[in-house]
Structure formats: C-alpha cells, structure tokens
Amino acid sequence: MQRRDFLTSSLAAGAALATLNLTTKASAAAEAKASSTKATAAKPAAPAAEPAPAPVVDAFVQPPLPYSLAALAPFLKEEQMSFHYSKHHAGYFKKLNGLVAGKPEAKMSLEELITKAQGPIFNNAAQAWNHTFFWSCISPDGGGSPKGPIGDAIDRDFGGIDQFKKIFTETAVTLFGSGWAWLAAGKDKKLQVLGLPNADNPLRQGLTPILTLDVWEHAYYIDYRNDRAKFVEEFWTKVNWEFAAHNLATLAKA
Ligand code: FE2
C-alpha cells in the first residue's frame, strides 16, 4: 500500500480499532458483572445492549497524490508536501464531509458544489477540488516548454511562452492575500489568465481550468518562508504541460 492510501486507510482503521477497544472493554465489564450476578443470586438476565449505530461513511474521499511526497524536490520538499497534502488538503475533505453529512449536498459532485454551493460548503469543496487539480499541474517530470496544441494556443493567445509566463507569474505573485493563479479557457477555446482569491475557481465563471498554481502561503511557507516570488519562479521547473495539454484536448472534444 502506498503511503497516501495508507493515510486514509490508517485513519479509518485507527477509528475502527478505537471503537473495537471500547467495545471490548464494555463487554469485559458486562461479563464480569454477569458472572458476579450468577454467583450471588439467580436474577433475570439484563436486556441486550442496543446495537451500535452504523458508521458514518464520508461522502468525499481525498484522492492519492500522483507521486510520492518527496518526488518534487527541490521545488517542494517532503515536509512541505506532507503538510500541504496530509494536513491542509486532507483538512478540507474532513471539514466538507462534516458539513454535508446527512444533507443533499453529500450526493453532489465537487464540481456541482463549486458552481452551486455558497459559504463554508463551497469553500471546502472548492479547496478539495482545487488541490487535487493542482497536484496534477506539477510533476517530477515537469518543466520545459509546452508542445503541440497547448503550445500553439499559448502562442496564439499570449504571443509566446515567455509572455505567457510573465503574465501568469505577475498574476500569481501580486494576487493579494490567499488564492490561485489560473490558466483557463472559455467555450471559444481562447486562453486567459486569472488570479482568483481564496477558494474561487474558473468553473464559477463557466470557464474550463487548464492549469493552476496555489499561492496560499501554506503552499510554500516551509520551503520558501514568505518568498512567494521565488516559489512561483521555481514552479516553472515542475509545471506539467502534458496535463495542461490533456485539459485543453478534453475541452476541444466537448
Ligand atoms: Fe493549498
């Protein structure tokens, strides 16, 4: 089992074990009490305990990382990725599952929640989706220049890769507070760069996300302290153009 699978499984297994221990302790106490009762008097047996309630099943499950926690170094080292994936990203799923438990939103997709929900449910659903998307926007084999249709589209809409990088970098570095820099496409397939605050996502504007960079400080504070500009500069060494090309190709088929 990979570590990322283990994270989810181990939490569930841990909870099950804790329940089992409590059950065992309760059973032992009941048996001791019953034994004592038999020795002193022949009274009717106590009624059976109420069956335990069925465990709550989470509506949304955090997908595994597409690589190991250490695979992106030196861009992002294992400790940074561990905090980001295992605490921050996992935390959004945990909060979302608590918010939607027993509600109609538990049956919706994350994409539906991004376009329809408001407030805390939107915030946590969008952050859950955004991070999963972001993990695929970077790759141990990333970097270089975009090839094929994605490269052609960037040339067409930005005047070349250098100009695109400049616009995207400036958007990411200057975005006030927490948020995301996005490359997105409209129904006309035209590419555009957006800097969106907090959990916001181009899907809310009817746009298709092609590429993103998380510029929340939690994305880089261990490796880069407060130097967002350096983090954004290094992003280009691991950017996953194949994933961006895949997203553009999917849009082209739609
Ligand atoms: Fe993040």
Image (tube, rainbow, N blue to C red):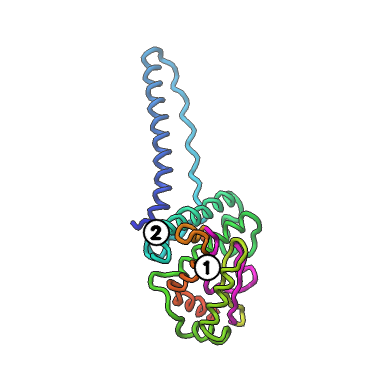
| Nearest to N terminus: mark 2 or mark 1 | 2
Q: Secondary structure at mark 2?
A: helix
- Residue 233 in the image: x percent, y percent? 49, 71
Residue occupying the point 60% across, 78% down:
192
The quadrant of the rendering that contains the C terminus is: bottom right
Give the residue pinned by disc 2: 78
Q: CA distance from mark 2 to mark 1?
A: 20 Å
The quadrant of the rendering that contains the N terminus is: bottom left
Asked whether the viewer can see residue 129, the reply is yes
Q: Residue furthest top?
A: 40
Cβ(mark 2) to ligand 1 < 8 Å? no
Q: Secondary structure at mark 1?
A: helix
Numbered badge on residue 229: 1
Asked whether the viewer can see residue 113, the reply is no
Residue toward you, 31 or 134: 134
> Which three-letter amino acid code belongs to the residue tagged 1?
Ala
Label 2 packing within 10 angstroms: few (<14), some (14-19), many (20+): some
Relative to residue 32, is residue 201 depicted above or below? below
Residue toward you, 42 or 68: 68
- Residue 214 in the image: x percent, y percent? 53, 65
Q: Quadrant of residue 186?
A: bottom right
Q: Is residue 244 left or right of residue 177?
A: left
Q: How many marks?
A: 2
- Residue 37 in the image: x percent, y percent? 40, 17
Residue occupying the point 61% across, 79% down:
187
- Residue 59 in the image: x percent, y percent? 52, 54
Q: Nearer the viewer, mark 2 or mark 1?
A: 1
Write the start and end of the magenta stretch as one range.
Answer: 189-217
Q: Quadrant of residue 40?
A: top left
Label 1 packing within 10 angstroms: few (<14), some (14-19), many (20+): some
